[in-house]
Image (cartoon, helix red, strand yellow):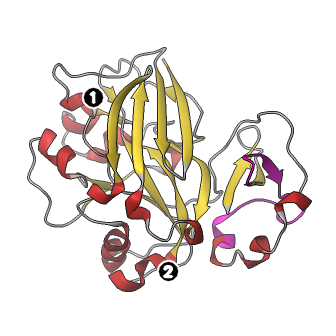
Amino acid sequence: MKLLRYGPAGSEKPGLLDADGKIRDLSAHLPDLTAERLGDLTALTKLDPKSLPLVDGTPRIGIPLAGIRQCVAIGLNYRKHAIEANLPIPEEPVIFFKAITSLSGPNDDIVLPPKSQATDWEIELAIVMARTARRVSKEQALEYVAGYTIANDVSERDWQIKRGGQWSKGKSFDSFCPLGPWLVTRDELPNPQTMNVELKVNGVVKQASNTEDMIFNCAHIVSYVSQFMTLLPGDVIITGTPGGVGVARKPPESLRAGDTVQLKIAQLGEQTQRVRA
């Protein structure tokens, strides 16, 4: 299934994307798509999408899940990205956090922080947890996953690199984690390590890779994180970005007001964001 939430910010309704790419309304079956529902989606899988009301027009798409409590992020998880950053290939996953207040809809604007001169892009595969995971094995890790979606780990590099070395500071501004457009359930993606990822700025490809190039795959990441913290239903883990970020380009590039950022991961859909001051 491809589950989503649509409508104005703060008033989203639950929906489902049918085989024709049309949004179907789920409001008669649940008030919202929340973290607590992810542990058992059996009732939704039994629904015939054609029996659900069609949603007219092209509504805004919101964050695909309500009630996200934690957003864990993995750094330097593609070999080429670690190399372009002039940093050693990690021997263990690099962990930081993004504030949940950075979450926004997949096509909502990216808002530049005041006086920002170094806001950057990072396309990432995002994992969404289905149930509580505590010290799970790599072999069982994906059984705890509800599904996958796209994230843009927007990063203000001055705050990330020059303000005391705390990555979360540069990655937690409002609008700095567009998420969606929909949550693709795990049954549709039994192997998340086979997807092409691509990001464009103003129509120019900046990042192009495949999730098979991750240093630590999704099962490893879920298992690893669960060793030192409890993962909760609805928690999001963004799994790292491939090479091609702006800060590593020669000369460095950054986002400016008026730019358009487009993200695409095979099977997971697309995002488009306008950048504004």
Question: Residue at the spot x=68%, y=58% of the render?
Answer: 3
Furthest toward the top, the residue is: 258
Residue 234 is drawn in which quadrant? bottom right
Q: In this view, does 258 lie to the left or right of 12?
A: left
Q: Does the magenta stretch include residue 254?
A: no
Q: Is residue 152 above or below residue 216?
A: above
Mark 1 Cα shell of 10 Å, populated few (<14), some (14-19), many (≥20): many
Residue beneath disc 2 = 143
Q: Three-letter amino acid code at disc 2?
A: Glu
- Please tell me whether residue 200 is drawn above or below residue 268 in the rendered image: above
Specify the quadrant of the image occupied by residue 15. Answer: bottom right
SS class of the residue under badge 1? Answer: helix
Q: Which of 7 and 204 is in front in this view?
A: 204
Please name the amino acid that badge 1 sits on.
Gly
Q: Give the range drawn in magenta.
A: 19-37
Q: Mark 1 points at which residue?
A: 246
